[in-house]
Image: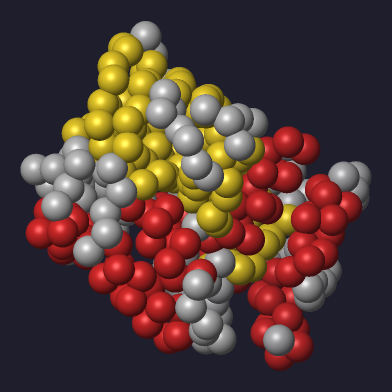
Amino acid sequence: METYGKRVEEVFRAAGHDMEIAVVAASDILQALETACRRDDLDAIVAGGGDGTISAAAGVAWRTGMPLGVIPAGTMNLFARSLKLPLDIWKVPEVLANGRLIDGDIGSADGRAFVHQFSMGLHARMVRYRESYKFASRAGKIGASVRAAIGVIFNPPDFEIEFDADGHRELRHVSAISVSNNHFGHATLMYADDVTAGHLGFYTAPPLSPAGVAKLVFDVLRGRFRASPFITEMSALAVDLHFPKVDRKINCVIDGELLPIRRRDVALRVHPGELKLLVGA
């Protein structure tokens, strides 16, 4: 880490910028971000980590108006892919140091920021299963994800939602919900091609059999999520979800983090142009 930090400092200095490096424990990340974003002598922050860390950094940057740069150091690095940044941590500092600022979009679920997606059903169950396994490396996490996906295939969720998407109201029985910060790309893994289009992507899948879940997983892995016959999609600025038959604990996933839903309603919004992002020139 010390070697990498020195390299980042050198790259930014060569581009005419001063850079301070702080290595922060997971339990201290939010406090460190809050402190950095409230300084008046910084032009931007650069956060390195997985999608969960980047999501936390984006939430603080959004609330404080601080520009954010991203170093992809996680497993999937989906938001970095949306920003078209190199996934090699040794190459991305030069791109950021010589980059430009854009006004990107950010989503929120009951006020909690997300840069990638809010999801329920299949994805939340898979993450819950994965977190029940022990792993200590990226390869271990991938292996745990494969085991969890197999578990979900043979035990898919099935639940009822009422939703209002920009005034369109409907009741649906589903196995999965995903609300993304801008639509996912047509031929990519589940990440947006453009984070400045100013809308939410709203996707649902009907109650699925094990064979149906397996087919949907295959479509996701080959970048054909939106083309899957199981997926219904809409665009919206605001999506309100209501769960009329909740009689037990339910979970959602926000940018990779499994979280409990404590009440029967969730308000999802897009905030166009409110997240300042450092991207390649």
Toward the top, the furthest residue is: 167
Q: Name the side, left or right, on which 233 lies relative to 177.
A: left
Q: Position of residue 233 (x, y in %)?
A: 23, 32
What residue lies at 66% left-to-right and 52% top-to-bottom?
56
Q: Quadrant of the N terminus?
A: bottom right
Residue at (78, 66) in percent of width and height: 27
Camera-nearest residue between 263 and 12: 263
Q: Is residue 194 above or below residue 212?
A: above
Seen at 23% across and 62% down, the residue is 153
* Number of on-image labels: 0
Residue 239 found in image quarter:
top left
What residue is drawn where x is 51% and y is 70%? 131
Q: Tell me residue 46's x, y (percent).
A: 68, 60
Q: Does residue 172 sit above or below 42 in this rendering? A: above
Name the spot of residue 100 as percent of width and height, x first: 57, 49
x, y percentage for residue 151? Answer: 30, 68
Residue 274, quarter of picture: top right
* In-front residue for pair 80/171: 171
Kindly give the residue lying farthest to the front in the view shown.
247
Q: Is residue 65 visible?
A: yes
In the depicted structure, whether residue 42 falls above or below residue 105 = below
Asked whether the viewer can see residue 84, the reply is no
Nearest the viewer among 211 and 179 is: 211
